[in-house]
Amino acid sequence: MFPEAYSINCVRQIRLWIAEGFVKEKQGKILEDVAQDYLKQLIYRSLVQVEWVDYDGSVRTCRVHDMIREVIVSRSEELSCCHVSIRDCSSFDGIGRCLSIHNNLDTPLERTTSSKTRSIIVSRADEVPNSFLSTCFENFKLMKVMDFECAPITYIPKEVGNLFHLRYLSLRGMKVQMLPKSINKLHNLETLDLKRSLVSELPTEISGLCKLRYLAGYIQNDDIEYHINSRKAIKVPSGIGHLESLHKLYNVEACSNAFIAELGKLRLLRRLEITKLKRENGKTLCIALKKMSDLRSLRICATSEEEILELQSILANDPLKVLQALPNLMNLRFLDGYEGKQLHFEGGGFQKLKYLTLEKLGGLNRLKIDDGALPHLEKLRIGHSPHLKEVPLEFII
Protein backbone atom coordinates (compact mmCIF):
# COMPACT_ATOMS: atom_id res chain seq x y z
CA MET A 1 0.00 0.00 0.00
CA PHE A 2 3.00 2.32 0.42
CA PRO A 3 5.36 3.69 -2.25
CA GLU A 4 8.74 2.16 -2.98
CA ALA A 5 11.41 2.91 -0.34
CA TYR A 6 8.72 4.46 1.90
CA SER A 7 9.52 4.78 5.60
CA ILE A 8 6.58 3.18 7.44
CA ASN A 9 5.70 4.22 10.98
CA CYS A 10 5.29 0.98 12.94
CA VAL A 11 2.48 2.26 15.15
CA ARG A 12 0.63 3.40 12.05
CA GLN A 13 1.08 -0.02 10.43
CA ILE A 14 -0.12 -1.85 13.53
CA ARG A 15 -3.29 0.23 13.74
CA LEU A 16 -3.95 -0.31 10.05
CA TRP A 17 -3.68 -4.07 10.58
CA ILE A 18 -6.14 -3.88 13.47
CA ALA A 19 -8.60 -1.80 11.44
CA GLU A 20 -8.47 -4.29 8.57
CA GLY A 21 -9.27 -7.14 10.95
CA PHE A 22 -5.96 -8.94 10.43
CA VAL A 23 -5.13 -9.12 14.15
CA LYS A 24 -6.78 -11.86 16.18
CA GLU A 25 -7.32 -11.62 19.91
CA LYS A 26 -5.18 -13.69 22.28
CA GLN A 27 -5.97 -14.34 25.89
CA GLY A 28 -4.17 -11.93 28.17
CA LYS A 29 -3.03 -9.62 25.34
CA ILE A 30 -4.56 -6.56 23.77
CA LEU A 31 -4.68 -6.30 19.97
CA GLU A 32 -1.80 -3.82 19.82
CA ASP A 33 0.54 -6.26 21.60
CA VAL A 34 -0.49 -9.14 19.33
CA ALA A 35 0.15 -6.99 16.26
CA GLN A 36 3.54 -6.00 17.67
CA ASP A 37 4.40 -9.71 17.84
CA TYR A 38 3.36 -10.08 14.18
CA LEU A 39 5.72 -7.27 13.20
CA LYS A 40 8.60 -8.79 15.18
CA GLN A 41 8.13 -12.10 13.36
CA LEU A 42 8.27 -10.36 9.98
CA ILE A 43 11.48 -8.60 11.06
CA TYR A 44 13.07 -11.85 12.32
CA ARG A 45 12.31 -13.43 8.93
CA SER A 46 13.91 -10.45 7.12
CA LEU A 47 10.66 -9.74 5.28
CA VAL A 48 10.60 -6.30 6.88
CA GLN A 49 13.69 -4.16 7.46
CA VAL A 50 14.23 -2.07 10.60
CA GLU A 51 14.93 1.58 9.81
CA TRP A 52 14.81 3.49 13.10
CA VAL A 53 14.99 2.23 16.69
CA ASP A 54 13.88 4.58 19.49
CA TYR A 55 15.83 5.31 22.69
CA ASP A 56 13.85 2.64 24.54
CA GLY A 57 14.74 -0.06 22.02
CA SER A 58 11.38 -0.15 20.26
CA VAL A 59 11.28 -0.18 16.46
CA ARG A 60 9.71 3.08 15.32
CA THR A 61 9.94 2.87 11.53
CA CYS A 62 10.53 0.09 9.03
CA ARG A 63 10.43 -0.54 5.30
CA VAL A 64 9.98 -3.36 2.81
CA HIS A 65 12.89 -4.35 0.57
CA ASP A 66 12.29 -3.40 -3.06
CA MET A 67 12.41 -7.01 -4.22
CA ILE A 68 9.92 -8.17 -1.57
CA ARG A 69 7.68 -5.24 -2.47
CA GLU A 70 7.61 -6.24 -6.14
CA VAL A 71 6.39 -9.71 -5.19
CA ILE A 72 3.72 -8.26 -2.89
CA VAL A 73 2.47 -5.77 -5.49
CA SER A 74 2.37 -8.42 -8.22
CA ARG A 75 0.36 -10.81 -6.06
CA SER A 76 -2.00 -8.04 -4.95
CA GLU A 77 -2.79 -7.09 -8.54
CA GLU A 78 -3.57 -10.71 -9.39
CA LEU A 79 -6.16 -10.74 -6.62
CA SER A 80 -7.61 -7.33 -7.60
CA CYS A 81 -6.69 -6.38 -4.10
CA CYS A 82 -4.79 -3.16 -4.55
CA HIS A 83 -4.44 -0.37 -7.10
CA VAL A 84 -0.99 1.18 -6.89
CA SER A 85 0.08 4.55 -8.32
CA ILE A 86 -3.28 5.66 -9.65
CA ARG A 87 -2.84 8.29 -12.36
CA ASP A 88 -6.14 8.11 -14.17
CA CYS A 89 -8.78 7.58 -11.50
CA SER A 90 -11.55 7.41 -14.11
CA SER A 91 -10.31 3.88 -14.88
CA PHE A 92 -11.00 2.79 -11.31
CA ASP A 93 -14.03 0.47 -11.40
CA GLY A 94 -14.61 0.34 -7.65
CA ILE A 95 -13.88 -3.39 -7.43
CA GLY A 96 -10.45 -3.25 -5.81
CA ARG A 97 -10.48 -3.83 -2.08
CA CYS A 98 -7.64 -1.37 -1.44
CA LEU A 99 -6.95 1.91 -3.21
CA SER A 100 -3.41 3.19 -2.80
CA ILE A 101 -2.63 6.61 -4.28
CA HIS A 102 1.03 7.56 -4.55
CA ASN A 103 0.79 10.63 -6.71
CA ASN A 104 -1.61 13.25 -8.04
CA LEU A 105 -5.22 12.52 -8.85
CA ASP A 106 -5.40 13.67 -12.47
CA THR A 107 -9.03 12.62 -12.87
CA PRO A 108 -11.69 12.52 -10.14
CA LEU A 109 -13.81 9.47 -9.34
CA GLU A 110 -17.05 11.12 -10.39
CA ARG A 111 -18.25 8.13 -12.42
CA THR A 112 -17.86 5.70 -9.56
CA THR A 113 -21.29 5.42 -7.95
CA SER A 114 -20.62 2.41 -5.75
CA SER A 115 -17.53 0.64 -4.53
CA LYS A 116 -16.40 -2.44 -2.67
CA THR A 117 -13.24 -0.63 -1.62
CA ARG A 118 -12.41 -1.14 2.07
CA SER A 119 -9.37 1.11 2.45
CA ILE A 120 -7.73 4.19 0.92
CA ILE A 121 -4.19 5.35 1.62
CA VAL A 122 -2.92 8.57 0.05
CA SER A 123 0.86 9.10 -0.05
CA ARG A 124 2.96 11.86 -1.61
CA ALA A 125 0.03 13.58 -3.31
CA ASP A 126 0.44 17.25 -4.25
CA GLU A 127 -3.25 17.76 -4.89
CA VAL A 128 -6.49 16.00 -3.92
CA PRO A 129 -9.63 17.37 -5.65
CA ASN A 130 -12.75 18.02 -3.57
CA SER A 131 -14.68 15.82 -5.99
CA PHE A 132 -12.51 12.88 -4.96
CA LEU A 133 -13.41 13.39 -1.30
CA SER A 134 -17.10 13.76 -2.08
CA THR A 135 -17.12 10.50 -4.04
CA CYS A 136 -15.29 8.65 -1.26
CA PHE A 137 -17.63 9.78 1.51
CA GLU A 138 -20.86 9.46 -0.47
CA ASN A 139 -20.33 6.18 -2.33
CA PHE A 140 -17.67 4.08 -0.59
CA LYS A 141 -20.07 2.79 2.06
CA LEU A 142 -17.96 -0.27 3.02
CA MET A 143 -14.86 1.75 3.86
CA LYS A 144 -12.89 0.67 6.96
CA VAL A 145 -9.67 2.66 6.53
CA MET A 146 -9.09 6.23 5.34
CA ASP A 147 -5.49 7.34 5.74
CA PHE A 148 -4.83 10.80 4.32
CA GLU A 149 -1.59 11.47 6.21
CA CYS A 150 0.01 14.75 5.01
CA ALA A 151 -2.40 14.99 2.06
CA PRO A 152 -3.24 18.56 0.91
CA ILE A 153 -6.82 18.43 2.20
CA THR A 154 -8.35 21.38 4.06
CA TYR A 155 -11.76 20.08 5.10
CA ILE A 156 -13.71 16.91 5.84
CA PRO A 157 -17.31 16.96 4.51
CA LYS A 158 -20.27 16.03 6.67
CA GLU A 159 -20.79 12.94 4.49
CA VAL A 160 -18.05 11.25 6.50
CA GLY A 161 -20.92 10.19 8.75
CA ASN A 162 -22.08 7.85 5.96
CA LEU A 163 -19.13 5.53 6.57
CA PHE A 164 -20.67 3.40 9.30
CA HIS A 165 -17.97 0.71 9.00
CA LEU A 166 -15.04 3.13 9.28
CA ARG A 167 -12.51 2.02 11.89
CA TYR A 168 -9.47 4.13 11.07
CA LEU A 169 -9.34 7.82 10.16
CA SER A 170 -5.99 9.61 9.92
CA LEU A 171 -5.82 13.33 9.19
CA ARG A 172 -2.23 13.58 10.41
CA GLY A 173 -0.26 16.46 8.95
CA MET A 174 -3.27 17.90 7.10
CA LYS A 175 -4.65 21.46 7.08
CA VAL A 176 -8.07 20.43 8.36
CA GLN A 177 -9.22 22.83 11.10
CA MET A 178 -12.41 21.19 12.38
CA LEU A 179 -14.34 17.95 12.34
CA PRO A 180 -18.02 17.80 11.30
CA LYS A 181 -20.63 16.93 13.91
CA SER A 182 -21.64 13.94 11.80
CA ILE A 183 -18.53 12.17 13.15
CA ASN A 184 -20.76 10.89 15.96
CA LYS A 185 -22.21 8.41 13.43
CA LEU A 186 -18.91 6.56 13.18
CA HIS A 187 -19.81 4.07 15.90
CA ASN A 188 -17.10 1.60 14.82
CA LEU A 189 -14.23 4.10 14.74
CA GLU A 190 -11.20 2.84 16.68
CA THR A 191 -8.40 5.21 15.59
CA LEU A 192 -8.61 8.99 15.18
CA ASP A 193 -5.21 10.49 14.40
CA LEU A 194 -5.07 14.30 14.36
CA LYS A 195 -1.35 14.80 15.00
CA ARG A 196 0.10 17.85 13.25
CA SER A 197 -3.32 18.80 11.86
CA LEU A 198 -4.93 22.19 12.56
CA VAL A 199 -7.77 20.77 14.66
CA SER A 200 -7.59 22.62 17.99
CA GLU A 201 -10.89 21.49 19.52
CA LEU A 202 -13.00 18.36 19.15
CA PRO A 203 -16.79 18.55 18.76
CA THR A 204 -18.94 17.41 21.69
CA GLU A 205 -20.21 14.59 19.48
CA ILE A 206 -16.86 12.84 19.93
CA SER A 207 -18.15 11.38 23.21
CA GLY A 208 -20.40 9.02 21.23
CA LEU A 209 -17.47 7.05 19.76
CA CYS A 210 -17.48 4.30 22.38
CA LYS A 211 -15.15 1.96 20.43
CA LEU A 212 -12.37 4.52 20.09
CA ARG A 213 -9.03 3.04 21.21
CA TYR A 214 -6.59 5.69 19.98
CA LEU A 215 -7.14 9.44 20.12
CA ALA A 216 -4.13 11.68 19.49
CA GLY A 217 -3.69 15.19 18.25
CA TYR A 218 -1.71 18.39 18.49
CA ILE A 219 -0.88 21.42 16.38
CA GLN A 220 2.79 21.55 15.44
CA ASN A 221 4.57 24.89 15.17
CA ASP A 222 7.73 24.18 13.15
CA ASP A 223 9.02 27.72 13.71
CA ILE A 224 9.82 26.90 17.34
CA GLU A 225 11.08 23.33 17.10
CA TYR A 226 12.48 21.80 20.34
CA HIS A 227 10.72 24.53 22.29
CA ILE A 228 8.13 23.94 24.99
CA ASN A 229 5.52 25.73 22.86
CA SER A 230 6.24 23.80 19.66
CA ARG A 231 3.15 21.64 20.19
CA LYS A 232 -0.29 22.90 21.11
CA ALA A 233 -2.61 20.37 22.74
CA ILE A 234 -6.18 19.84 21.58
CA LYS A 235 -9.26 20.65 23.65
CA VAL A 236 -11.53 17.74 24.40
CA PRO A 237 -15.13 18.47 25.47
CA SER A 238 -16.89 16.99 28.47
CA GLY A 239 -17.98 13.40 28.06
CA ILE A 240 -14.48 11.96 27.63
CA GLY A 241 -15.38 9.42 30.31
CA HIS A 242 -17.74 7.70 27.85
CA LEU A 243 -14.75 6.59 25.74
CA GLU A 244 -14.02 3.65 28.00
CA SER A 245 -12.20 1.68 25.27
CA LEU A 246 -9.41 4.28 25.01
CA HIS A 247 -5.88 2.91 25.31
CA LYS A 248 -4.07 6.07 24.27
CA LEU A 249 -5.05 9.70 24.88
CA TYR A 250 -2.32 11.95 23.63
CA ASN A 251 -1.72 15.66 24.17
CA VAL A 252 -4.98 17.01 25.52
CA GLU A 253 -5.65 20.11 27.60
CA ALA A 254 -6.84 19.87 31.18
CA CYS A 255 -9.93 22.04 30.75
CA SER A 256 -11.40 21.68 34.23
CA ASN A 257 -11.56 19.54 37.35
CA ALA A 258 -14.64 17.84 35.91
CA PHE A 259 -12.68 16.86 32.80
CA ILE A 260 -9.80 15.44 34.87
CA ALA A 261 -12.25 13.50 37.06
CA GLU A 262 -13.70 11.88 33.94
CA LEU A 263 -10.25 10.58 33.02
CA GLY A 264 -10.57 8.23 35.97
CA LYS A 265 -13.24 6.32 34.02
CA LEU A 266 -10.69 5.36 31.36
CA ARG A 267 -9.57 2.19 33.13
CA LEU A 268 -7.90 0.70 30.00
CA LEU A 269 -5.71 3.74 29.36
CA ARG A 270 -2.06 2.84 28.74
CA ARG A 271 -0.66 6.18 27.66
CA LEU A 272 -1.68 9.65 28.75
CA GLU A 273 -0.26 13.03 27.86
CA ILE A 274 -1.92 16.05 29.42
CA THR A 275 -1.04 19.73 29.69
CA LYS A 276 -2.25 23.02 31.21
CA LEU A 277 -2.81 21.56 34.65
CA LYS A 278 -3.27 23.96 37.56
CA ARG A 279 -2.66 23.63 41.27
CA GLU A 280 -6.37 23.30 42.00
CA ASN A 281 -6.44 20.22 39.74
CA GLY A 282 -3.94 18.35 41.92
CA LYS A 283 -6.23 16.32 44.17
CA THR A 284 -8.56 15.38 41.32
CA LEU A 285 -5.62 14.25 39.17
CA CYS A 286 -4.29 12.04 41.97
CA ILE A 287 -7.66 10.30 42.30
CA ALA A 288 -7.95 9.80 38.53
CA LEU A 289 -4.42 8.38 38.17
CA LYS A 290 -4.96 5.81 40.92
CA LYS A 291 -7.85 4.33 38.89
CA MET A 292 -5.68 3.81 35.78
CA SER A 293 -4.15 0.51 36.86
CA ASP A 294 -2.82 -0.30 33.37
CA LEU A 295 -1.19 3.08 32.71
CA ARG A 296 2.31 2.54 31.28
CA SER A 297 3.35 5.94 29.98
CA LEU A 298 2.53 9.29 31.58
CA ARG A 299 3.63 12.69 30.43
CA ILE A 300 2.62 15.93 32.13
CA CYS A 301 3.83 19.06 30.36
CA ALA A 302 4.19 22.67 31.35
CA THR A 303 2.10 25.26 29.56
CA SER A 304 4.88 27.74 28.91
CA GLU A 305 8.28 28.75 30.14
CA GLU A 306 6.70 31.71 31.92
CA GLU A 307 4.08 29.57 33.67
CA ILE A 308 6.06 26.48 34.66
CA LEU A 309 3.78 23.73 35.90
CA GLU A 310 4.53 23.04 39.54
CA LEU A 311 4.30 19.29 39.34
CA GLN A 312 5.35 18.94 42.96
CA SER A 313 2.25 20.84 44.10
CA ILE A 314 -0.10 19.09 41.71
CA LEU A 315 0.83 15.59 42.79
CA ALA A 316 0.25 16.02 46.51
CA ASN A 317 3.73 17.49 47.20
CA ASP A 318 5.37 14.17 46.38
CA PRO A 319 4.79 13.01 42.80
CA LEU A 320 6.49 9.66 43.24
CA LYS A 321 4.13 8.57 46.03
CA VAL A 322 1.23 8.84 43.59
CA LEU A 323 3.00 7.51 40.51
CA GLN A 324 4.49 4.41 42.14
CA ALA A 325 0.93 3.28 42.86
CA LEU A 326 0.56 2.66 39.09
CA PRO A 327 1.60 -1.03 38.92
CA ASN A 328 2.26 -1.22 35.17
CA LEU A 329 4.05 2.08 34.60
CA MET A 330 6.98 1.42 32.25
CA ASN A 331 7.89 4.87 30.93
CA LEU A 332 8.09 7.97 33.10
CA ARG A 333 9.18 11.44 32.02
CA PHE A 334 9.68 14.50 34.17
CA LEU A 335 9.80 17.43 31.74
CA ASP A 336 9.93 20.91 33.24
CA GLY A 337 7.27 21.32 35.87
CA TYR A 338 8.92 19.67 38.87
CA GLU A 339 10.45 22.38 41.06
CA GLY A 340 11.51 20.17 43.98
CA LYS A 341 15.15 19.83 45.01
CA GLN A 342 15.05 16.05 45.42
CA LEU A 343 13.52 13.01 43.71
CA HIS A 344 13.49 9.98 46.00
CA PHE A 345 12.58 6.54 44.60
CA GLU A 346 11.82 4.45 47.65
CA GLY A 347 12.43 0.70 47.92
CA GLY A 348 9.74 -1.51 46.42
CA GLY A 349 8.46 1.19 44.09
CA PHE A 350 8.13 1.22 40.30
CA GLN A 351 8.62 -2.51 39.86
CA LYS A 352 8.00 -2.45 36.07
CA LEU A 353 9.56 0.90 35.15
CA LYS A 354 12.07 0.51 32.29
CA TYR A 355 12.67 4.05 31.05
CA LEU A 356 13.12 7.16 33.17
CA THR A 357 13.73 10.63 31.73
CA LEU A 358 14.61 13.70 33.79
CA GLU A 359 14.90 16.86 31.75
CA LYS A 360 14.79 20.62 32.30
CA LEU A 361 14.37 20.24 36.07
CA GLY A 362 15.66 23.61 37.19
CA GLY A 363 15.48 23.03 40.95
CA LEU A 364 16.58 19.39 41.17
CA ASN A 365 19.93 18.87 42.90
CA ARG A 366 19.66 15.29 44.18
CA LEU A 367 18.44 11.97 42.78
CA LYS A 368 18.08 9.20 45.36
CA ILE A 369 17.17 5.57 44.53
CA ASP A 370 16.78 3.04 47.35
CA ASP A 371 17.72 -0.64 47.11
CA GLY A 372 14.80 -2.57 45.61
CA ALA A 373 13.44 0.39 43.69
CA LEU A 374 13.45 0.41 39.88
CA PRO A 375 14.60 -3.24 39.58
CA HIS A 376 13.89 -3.37 35.82
CA LEU A 377 15.19 0.06 34.86
CA GLU A 378 17.03 -0.21 31.53
CA LYS A 379 17.63 3.42 30.59
CA LEU A 380 18.01 6.58 32.64
CA ARG A 381 18.18 9.79 30.63
CA ILE A 382 19.11 13.02 32.36
CA GLY A 383 18.73 16.15 30.26
CA HIS A 384 19.45 19.77 31.12
CA SER A 385 19.21 19.99 34.93
CA PRO A 386 21.91 22.54 35.88
CA HIS A 387 21.71 22.14 39.66
CA LEU A 388 21.80 18.33 39.82
CA LYS A 389 24.82 17.45 41.97
CA GLU A 390 24.13 13.95 43.29
CA VAL A 391 23.06 10.70 41.59
CA PRO A 392 23.30 7.10 42.85
CA LEU A 393 26.82 5.66 42.57
CA GLU A 394 25.67 2.56 40.63
CA PHE A 395 24.57 4.77 37.73
CA ILE A 396 28.03 6.27 37.42
CA ILE A 397 30.09 3.06 37.57
Image: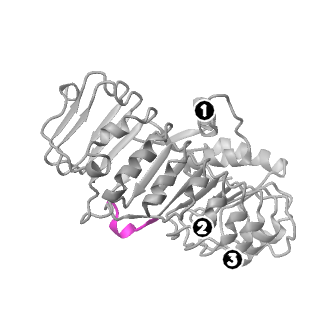
Circle 3 crowding by C-alpha within 10 Å: few under 14, some 14–19, many from 20: some
Check disc 2 and give the amino acid type.
Thr
Per the model, the C-alpha gap separating discs 3 and 2 is 29 Å
* Residue 122 seen in this snapshot: no
Image point (37%, 61%), residue name: 276
> Contact, CB < 8 Å: mark 3 with mark 1?
no
The answer to which quarter of the image holds residue 267 is top right
Query: Does the magenta run of residues contain 56?
Result: no
What secondary structure is marked by label 1? helix
Circle 2 crowding by C-alpha within 10 Å: few under 14, some 14–19, many from 20: some
Residue beneath disc 1: 37
Who comes first in sequence, dot 2 or dot 1? Answer: 1
Q: Nearer the viewer, mark 3 or mark 2?
A: 2
Who comes first in sequence, dot 3 or dot 2? Answer: 3
Residue beneath disc 3: 129
Residue 140 drawn above or below residue 242: below
Who comes first in sequence, dot 3 or dot 1? Answer: 1
> Contact, CB < 8 Å: mark 3 with mark 2?
no
Residue 336 drawn above or below residue 108: above
Check disc 3 and give the amino acid type.
Pro
Question: What are the residue bounds of the magenta stretch?
Answer: 219-226
Q: Nearer the viewer, mark 2 or mark 1?
A: 2
Image point (62%, 54%), residue name: 191
**Residue furthest bottom in the image:** 130
Check disc 1 and give the amino acid type.
Asp
How many marks the image carries: the answer is 3
Residue beneath disc 2: 204
Per the model, the C-alpha gap separating discs 3 and 1 is 39 Å
**Residue furthest top in the image:** 371
Left or right, 123 with reference to 61 = right
